[in-house]
Image (spheres, rainbow, N blue to C red):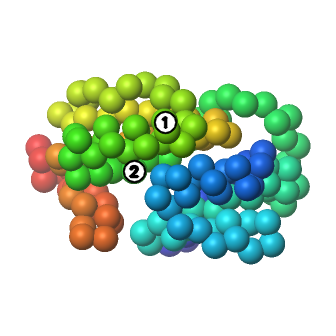
Amino acid sequence: MEQRISLVTLGVADVARAKAFYEQLGWHGQEVEETVFFQAGGLALVLWGRDKLADDAGIDDPGTRGFGGITLAQNVRSRAEVDEVIATATKAGAEVTKPARETFYGGYAGYFADPDGNIWEIAWNPGFTLGPDGTLTVPDFSAMN
C-alpha cells in the first residue's frame, strides 16, 4: 500500500449547512449528488451525509456527537495566521475548544470544532516547512539528534 491519503470524508448531519460553513472559511467546493468536494492541496476534503457514509462503510452509527479520536490539522505560515483562521472559523459558527497558545514544540496552535463536531487544529510550527502551495514536508527527525 502506498503511503498516501487521497480523501478525507467528514460525515455531516446537514450537507448544506456544512458546505456553507466551509465556504465561510474561504474554501471553494463542488457539490455532486449531495456530496461536496473541496480540493485541499494534494488531497480532497469531502462532506457527505453522516447516515450515508455510515451505510457505505457498513457500520452502525449511533449519531453521537463527541470526540472520535481524530483531528484534522492545517499548518499555516505565522502565529498571526493561526489567530486569523480561528477568528474566521468562529464567525462562521465554529466553537473554539482550545484557544491558540504557545506549544511545547516552540510553535503556536489552537483548536476549534466545526458545526458537526469535527475537530480542527490550526498550527504554526517553525520546524515544518510549507511549500508555496501549502504542501507540508515532514522534517527528517533523525537528522535533528
Please determine whether, in this image, residue 67 is positioned above or below residue 56: above
Query: Of circles 2 and 1, which is in front?
Result: 1
Q: Quadrant of residue 123?
A: top left
Please determine whether, in this image, residue 130 is positioned above or below residue 61: below
Along the polypeptide, which appears first: circle 2 or circle 1? Answer: 2
Instruction: Name the residue tied to disc 1.
Output: 90
Q: What residue type is labelled 2?
A: Gln
Q: In which quarter of the image is residue 83?
A: top left
Instruction: Give the class, few, some or many, for how many residues have Cα within 10 Å of label 2's Cα (few <14, many ≥20).
Output: some
Q: What residue type is labelled 1?
A: Thr
Q: Residue shown at 33%/50% (left/top)?
A: 75
Tell me the quadrant of the picture where the N terminus can be found.
bottom right
| Secondary element type, mark 1 | helix
| Secondary element type, mark 2 | strand
Tell me if residue 119 can be seen: no
Instruction: Name the residue tied to disc 2.
Output: 74
Q: Residue shown at 70%/49% (left/top)?
A: 17
**Left or right: residue 104 compared with residue 40:** left
Q: Indicate which disc residue 123 carries.
A: none
Q: Residue shown at 63%/54% (left/top)?
A: 20
**Left or right: residue 73 compared with residue 134:** right
> Percent from the top left, x then y, of residue 60?
88, 43
Please determine whether, in this image, residue 77 is positioned above or below residue 99: below
> Percent from the top left, x then y, of residue 21?
59, 49
> Percent from the top left, x then y, of residue 63?
82, 36
Tell me the quadrant of the picture where the C terminus can be found.
top left
Instruction: Give the class, few, some or many, for how many residues have Cα within 10 Å of label 1's Cα (few <14, many ≥20).
Output: some
Q: Which of 75 and 83 is in front in this view?
A: 83
**Left or right: residue 26 compared with residue 85:** right
In this rendering, the count of numbered labels is 2
